[in-house]
Image (cartoon, rainbow, N blue to C red):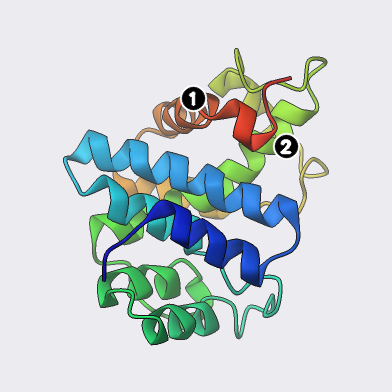
Amino acid sequence: MDLNFDDALALLREKNTNESLVRHGIAVSDAMAAYARKFGEDETTWRVTGLLHDVDYELHPTIEEHGMVGARWLADLGYPAHMTRAVQAHNDYHGVARESLMERALFACDELTGLITAAALVRPDKSIRGLEASSVRKKMKDKAFARGVNREDIIKGAEELGMDLNEHIAFVIAAMAADAERLGLAG
């Protein structure tokens, strides 16, 4: 299969009409592409995996189904096994151990992009530009803020990736800031 971001984005939009879910996929794809460059991995594979990790979420949001259904859809469409496995492994419920660097990066970026997005949107300028890791850490401590974001997964993700949490947050902010307009975070 020839991986293509635009085709993957069309698939994500076909399965998800909620623009917030689409933007989340794009945010994770931005972070994944940046980590692929950092680690010398295939950027397109990592970007498309990040984009499609929640392809099933709108139709199958339960923890029991989410990830497994999406992985099946992607496998049926001919996506490679290492990508479908990463989609399965990003949800701890299924017990799929994260073995590859791509699987660990996907898990590490997923919840964090949601927290960063929320932190950017409550700023007076509603922009990710200039957002500091320390501000995200402060919001992370406030359990009432973005309460759907799993803080334990953010911490666990950075650990599994072998990154200092502050460095990981700053890295993902920078990756998302480079695509601020498309993410709706340009202010």
The quarter of the displayed image where residue 31 is located:
top left
The quarter of the displayed image where residue 14 is located:
bottom right
Quarter of the picture holding the N terminus: bottom left
Asked if labels 1 and 2 touch by Cβ distance under 8 angstroms, the answer is no
Residue under pointer 2: 118
Specify which label sits upstream in the sequence, 2 or 1.
2
> Is residue 37 positioned above or below 84 on the image?
above
> Is residue 168 positioned above or below 125 on the image?
below
Asked whether the viewer can see residue 51, the reply is: yes
The quarter of the displayed image where residue 99 is located:
bottom left
- The kind of residue on which mark 1 rests is Ala
Q: Is residue 101 left or right of residue 22?
A: left
> Is residue 57 positioned above or below 112 on the image?
below
Instruction: Give the mark toward the camera: 2 or 1.
Output: 1
Residue at left offset 73%, top offset 37%: 118
- The kind of residue on which mark 2 rests is Ala
Residue under pointer 1: 178
Q: Is residue 134 left or right of residue 92?
A: right
Q: Which element is circle 1 on?
A: loop
Residue at left offset 74%, top offset 19%: 187
* Image disc number at residue 32: none
